[in-house]
Amino acid sequence: MSKKYSQLKAALVLARASLIATVRSPTSVVFALLFPIIFVTVFGAMVDNTAVKVKIVLSPHSDTSSPMYAAVKAIRIFDLSYGKDSAAMLGELKKGRIAGILYLHPPTVTNGVPYFGTDLLGSSAVADKLPLIQAALQEAASQVNRKVLPNQPVAASIKMVHIPGRVYRQIDFILPGQLGFSLLMAGVFSSAFLLFNLRNTLVLKRIYVTPIKRSFLLLGEMISRLLFQILCFIIITALGYYVFDFTLVNGLITFLEMLLLSVFGLVIFMGIGFIISGLIRNESSIAPVANTLTVPQVLLCGLFFPIDNYPVWLRTFCEMLPLTFFVDGLRKIAFEGLHIWQIPVQLLGLIVWATIIAILSVRLFRWE
C-alpha cells in the first residue's frame, strides 16, 4: 500500500529551501532589514523627539539681571544663545538660520511701577515660527507680571489643567511605518523576482510533475517569508524599544499582536509579488511594475509623515490602501494599547485585501 502524499510536508520542505535562499539574498536583507534599520536610527536619533526647538539669539548689552531674562531662559522650546556680532546676527536672521533676536531692556520705573521692556526682531524667512515665539514670550511676560505685581486684578485669565498621558515620541510614528516598509518591499520584490526566476529556470516545471498543489507551493513560500519577516520584525522592534524608547503599551502581548497583524500584511504584499510574477513575461519589467505599485504606497500611506493635511479626496484614497490599514493598525496597537479585535476598520480592510489578493495569486499562478 503506497503512502499518502503529504501536501503540508511538501510545503514545509519548500519553505525551508526558500528561507535559506531568502537569507542568502542581499536584496531581501537590504530591503527588509537594512533600509528600515537606517530609517529608524536616523529618525529615532533626532534630538528631543517630542519638543520643537526654536533658535533664539540674545542681543549684546541685554540686561541679564532682569526677571524677564530668567523667564525667557526657562522657555523649553527656545534654544537660547548669546550673540556678539550684531551684523552677523542680522545675516543669520535674514537667512532663516535663527528664528529671532531678543533685546532685554534695562528696567525703568514709571509711577513707582517697574517696567521690563523686551524687543523681538523677526524676519519673513521664519514667519511660520513667529506666532509660536510671540506666544511663548507673552507667557513669560505674564509670569514676570504675576511675580513683580502679585495680587493685581486682571480682566481675563486662562487656567490650564494637566492630565497624565503617554509621551508620544517621533519613533512611535516612524517605527510602525518602517515595519510596513520592510514587509511591503520584501514581500513584493522578493516574491516577484523569486517566483519568476524559479519559473524561468524551469524549477517550477520540475515541481509541477510532483503531486504538490500550487496553493501549497505558495503556502510554503509564505511560511518561509513569514519566518524571515519575524526575524526582521524582532530586530527592528527591539532596536526601537531598547534604544529609542518605542512604546509597547502591553509589552510582549502588544508585540505578539503586532506580529499577528503582520501576517495579513504578508499575505497581501507577497500576493502582489506573486501576481506580478504571473503576469510579467520579461524580468526587466518586474522592477518598474513593482515600483509603480509600491512607491505610491510608501509616499501616500503615512510611513514618514501624517496624511491628515492631504486634500479630502486624496486622503480618502490613501485610507483605502492596504499599507495604510496595516500601519495604522500597528500604531493603534503599539501606542494606544488597543487589542487586535479593537481595530475593526483596519482588521476588516486587511482581511478584504488579503482575500482578494490570495484568490488572484492562486488564479494567476503559472508553472511555466
Image: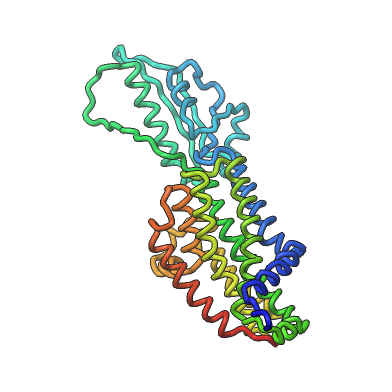
Residue closer to the observer: 316 or 25: 25
Q: Which residue is drawn at the image coordinates 68% and 62% (left, top)?
A: 31
Of residue 279 and residue 1, the one placed in the foreground of this image is 1
In the rendered image, the residue lying farthest to the top is 112
Whether residue 282 is visible, yes or no, is no
Q: Is residue 90 above or below residue 141?
A: below
Q: Position of residue 215 (x, y in %)?
A: 59, 79
The quadrant where residue 212 appears: bottom right
Residue 216 x, y percent position in the rendering:
61, 76
Quarter occupied by the C terminus: bottom right
Residue 112 sits above or below residue 79 on the image: above
Query: Going 41% across and 24% down the picture, which residue do you hit?
Result: 117
Residues 55 and 22: in front is: 22
Judged left or right of residue 149, residue 246 is right
> Colour scheme in the image?
rainbow
Percent across and percent down for residue 162 are 34, 33
In this view, 98 is above or below 318: above
On screen, 90 above or below 194? above
Asked whether the viewer can see residue 238, the reply is yes
Residue drawn at x 43%, y 68% is 349
Classify the position of the N terminus by image quarter.
Answer: bottom right
x 70%, y 79%: residue: 196
Q: Is residue 118 left or right of residue 90?
A: left
